[in-house]
Amino acid sequence: MKSLEDKIAEWGGNPARMLQNSPVGKYVYPIPAEFSNWMEEQRAWREGVVLFDQSVHMTDLYVRGPDVMRLLSDLAVNSFKGFGPNKAKQIVCVNEEGFLIGDCILFGLGEDEVNIVGRPNLPNWVQFHAETGGYDVTVERDERRIDAPDAPRKTYRYELQGPKAMALLEELNEGGPLVTKFFQMGEITIAGCRARTLSHGMGGAEGLEFWGPAEDGPAVKAAILKAGASHGLRQAGARAYSSVAAESGWIPSPVPAIYEGEATRAYREWLPAASFEGVASIGGSFQSDDIRDYYVTPWDFDYGRVVKFDHDFIGRAALEKMAEGPHRQKITLVWDRDGVLEIFAGLMGPDPKPKLMEMPTGHYAAHPFDAVLGGEGRRIGFSTYPTYTVNESAWISLAVVEPEFASPGSRVELLWGEDPVSEKPVVERHRQMRLGAEVQPWPIHAASRESYRKRG
């Protein structure tokens, strides 16, 4: 079987060029594009209640055995003091040089059992070390639908969010009191089916994620839809769901820092060429022949707050040297109205037209990277996940920039479109454009910053 290392060699040892020209487009959510219309589905998590069906687009990695906690502690920047059954947390891993591999949600299912849920790059990293590091653990994968279209999934996973979510959940619950303390796990019973829950929220309102055996999914969803009708429930389709990250301030998919260097060679030789890391694409105006220019540190994504030097882990020495900074900062960019209108007006003008910005999410690669420019056109960072949100009546994106440009109200410029245009078949011929943007905090919604994020 061809490995990722073999595939990089076929590209002359240049993984940046390989990813920039990958034929694969953006990350896929294999659910209906819309259940009603994406604008009202967006409004639902800010004004009412929305149902997210997360059953098919994420990888689940179950890790069991007496060395589970030792494995996780050896890999993650997080502290595991106080972690155990019925607890959940974000797990963040870096390479030996302190650059990000990825992050996922970690669920404590039992004394010696956890589930890691998210995009495949972090489950892959954990599985590799579980299998090659001499740990007394076993791993079981439950693949996202796109990687195993015919395989049944172990669980359904739903989420109800929005200011009316808790009222609906209380009405649906046939069991004991709901656990609503932030990032604590509990139980709920819906339509006679018991499920486990995780308390978290977005849009400044509480909500619950809950999951159970896949065979219970249809009955649970039917009960939710029936009870939800009187609450104005909306189901979120793929179009609305793809815009959640930009509003909530989460960057889902860093380029995992594994594509070069001896420290990760064995991992690249273990990863198949057809893995997520092997087929993922980079798209946008931030173009470099050096893959390291796409790597990020925990501080770039505001994960410095979870780095704890109370245990030994891969990358600890490098992070200790980085800790004092300076660090780039994550921000929200609000794109200038006139610049956005110029892009759309250009689609009705002569060729070459501007790069299409599909609504509500304009990105077209697994790893969107657009250049952010400061004074005199100097590149000061990158922008990712351009999104139109009806809740803000604006195009926004998340960005990572040098600290002197990160103050709210600061002005920067964006480059939209590729130059040169890559070989990705999802990218049409176009011309690159420059437009202004204003720096704002993240999440952009004040209630989210003041309640959801503070509770974290």
Image: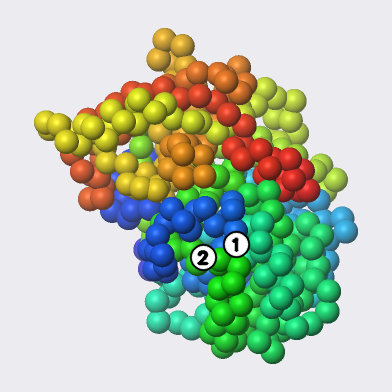
- Compared with 92, 133 (above or below) is below
Q: Residue at x 55, y 45 (%)?
A: 247
Q: Give 163 or 290, whichever is nearer the viewer.
A: 163
Q: Are marks 2 and 1 in contact (CB under 8 Å)?
A: yes
Q: Residue at x 46, y 39 (%)?
A: 393
Mark 2 lies on a secondary structure that is strand
Left or right: where does residue 443 sit relative to residue 145?
right
Q: Give 64 or 300, whichever is nearer the viewer.
A: 300
Q: Give 453 or 141, whichever is nearer the viewer.
A: 453
Mark 1 residue crowding within 10 angstroms, few (<14) / some (14–19) / many (20+): many
Q: Quadrant of residue 447?
A: top right
Q: Give 306 or 199, whichever is nearer the viewer.
A: 199
One can see residue 314 in this view: no
Q: Residue at x 87, y 55 (%)?
A: 81
Left or right: where does residue 390 sit relative to residue 116?
left
Q: Earlier in the sequence, mark 2 or mark 1?
A: 1
State the mark number for residue 234. Answer: 2
